[in-house]
Image (cartoon, rainbow, N blue to C red):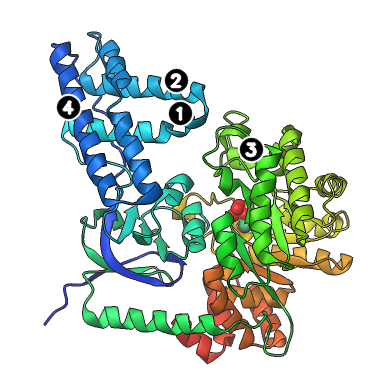
Amino acid sequence: MTSTMRTLTGIGVSPGSAIGPVAVVRPPQPLPATEPCSADPQQDLTRVADSLSVVADDLDAKAAKLEGDAAEMVAAAAMIARDPGLIEAVEQNLDGHTGPAHALQAAVAGYAEQFEALGGYFAERVADLRDVGMRAEAVLLGRPVPGVPELTEPSIVVAEDLAPAETAMLSPDLVLGIITSGGGRTSHTAILAAQRGLPAAVQVAGALEIPDGTTVALDGESGAVVLDPDETVKTKLRARSERLAQLNELTSPGSTSDGHPVALLANIGDVNDARAAALTAAEGVGLFRTEFVFLDAQNAPGVAEQADLYEAVLAPFGTRPVTVRTLDAGADKPLAFADLGPEPNPALGRRGYRLMEERPDLLRDQLAALAEAQRRTGASVKVMAPMIATADQARAFAETAHEAGLPVAGIMIEVPSAALRSRHLLAACDFASIGTNDLSQYTMAADRMVGELADLLDPFQPAVIDLVAAACEGGRINERPVGVCGESAGDPLMALVLTGLGVSSLSMSPKRMPLVRFALGLHELATCRAMAEAARACADAAEARAGVADLAHPDLRELLGV
Ligand code: PEP
Ligand code: MG
């Protein structure tokens, strides 16, 4: 019997596997440019009102099947669809110059502006308002409804890509995994998926053509997506998941087989992540991405609000060190309250620490809140700034943090200049953590958001490995610790290379930690050094990865399927 299974292949970015039906996130389509003007505004107004009430009924039905916050969120969106003010705004736009779909779009845009101006609760409803508008336009035009579907059964979400807020909104109880046709290894979809322990694959060509409801088997390690998998595929995938799950029982501190310590730390994005990570064998936190907490905030959070938040993050870790990164806003992570306006090249613009130079009030408040949380908890806090490029910036940040009462202040090395001159930067602060996601982007001049450039962003690119080596050299000269907190720290083979290059800690999604711990424990430091040398001797990333895999222990190779 011939198999009807089809396999799509992408890049695995969050390990684990999932088997289930897909729910496809349809991108909104532009309105037809040639929609005729309304000949009968009253009749068209009724059509728009009917479309909005179809959307409202649909949302109410979905809310009835959900519980708790998720149910409330969906019911609130249904109320927006029933808002008489919205219909009045449509009526005003049906003025003889537009058709009904354009009148609806204009009404939603105007209403969104009003919501934004009101701020607070209303401003937070703008995304819902736009979502309601998109849905009603689709109903009006007889098109499939776009946007993140309200899931009613455990599903694997398929999308072109997901904005950070969209990924965050996905109900964790109902999402089994994520597949995107776009995105990249270090896009925030990948990071948030790994953070939530959701298996994920990006750059899966043909993913958007998978019909809704098709059962697929997703391998978040290899990036393979099997459509209509048979029992053999399902059994194999489950068996590998089980072997990986067994590694969770290992809880020893990170170390090579000959006892060279490499601290295994957690990357976290909010209080829930902190609580979950604290329950694992993570030796602390290597990266708390504070901006993730404020992605939806319209106004800058105050000192008191932040101090409570940081206290809740620090407390679960007791005496284990927690590295907190100051707001890394801008480019791929815009924050409404820290927006300096459009720039031609946001990734090269006033983002990260550069933005804090423009808005010292934000930095001051954040450091004050962190110092207060440290006082309340007695926690071992380290603070670091993103996107540091010069020794002057490193010194200025460390001084500001020390003055705020935070004795351990470091920098992220994400810009090639910082890696190359790390001996000067590390003379000016207390530690460094290499952000390989951005370091790859800036070394290879390849936008991390452009999934098609994923090959250039492979962490095994020898040029990036050379820069990591340069960064470590600066640490050695100054006797300062240098860790890695980019996604590459969670890649077991790369973790061995990084260890060989001399990093003192590896920070990753806690879900990735057991495999990295296992990989470290199988190799001596000398082997890790030989791997680093082998990788640096290669001409390209694929050759470097294969060369390192050749030197790896057979048990690891078997588990990774390399
Ligand atoms: C990095 O750039 O590697 C990093 C850890 O920071 P982020 O991914 O949040 O930009
Ligand atoms: Mg970064």
Neighbourhood count class around disc 3 (C-alpha, 10 Å): few under 14, some 14–19, many 20 upward: some
The answer to whether residue 87 is above or below residue 335 is: above
Identified at 58% across, 82% down, the residue is 519
Does label 3 point to a residue whose CB lies under 8 Å from ligand 1?
Answer: no
What residue is pinned by disc 3? 301
Find numbered disc 1 in the image and state the secondary structure of the residue it sits on.
helix
Q: How crowded is mark 4: few (under 14 residues within 10 Å), some or many (20 or more)?
A: some
Q: Do the residues labelled 3 and 2 touch (CB within 8 Å)?
A: no
Locate residue 480, reporting x and y percent. Answer: 84, 65
Q: Earlier in the sequence, mark 1 or mark 2?
A: 2
- Residue kind at label 1, given as amino acid type: Phe
Q: How far apart are marks 1 and 4 (CA)?
A: 24 Å
Disc 1 target residue: 122
Residue 453: x and y, percent?
A: 48, 55
Count residues near mark 2 (Cα–Cα under 10 Å), then give few for <14, some for 14-19, many for 20+. some
Which quadrant holds residue 201? bottom left
Q: Distance between the residues labelled 3 and 4?
A: 40 Å
Which mark is on residue 114?
2
Q: Name the residue under label 4.
A: 50
* 1 and 2 marks in contact (CB < 8 Å): yes
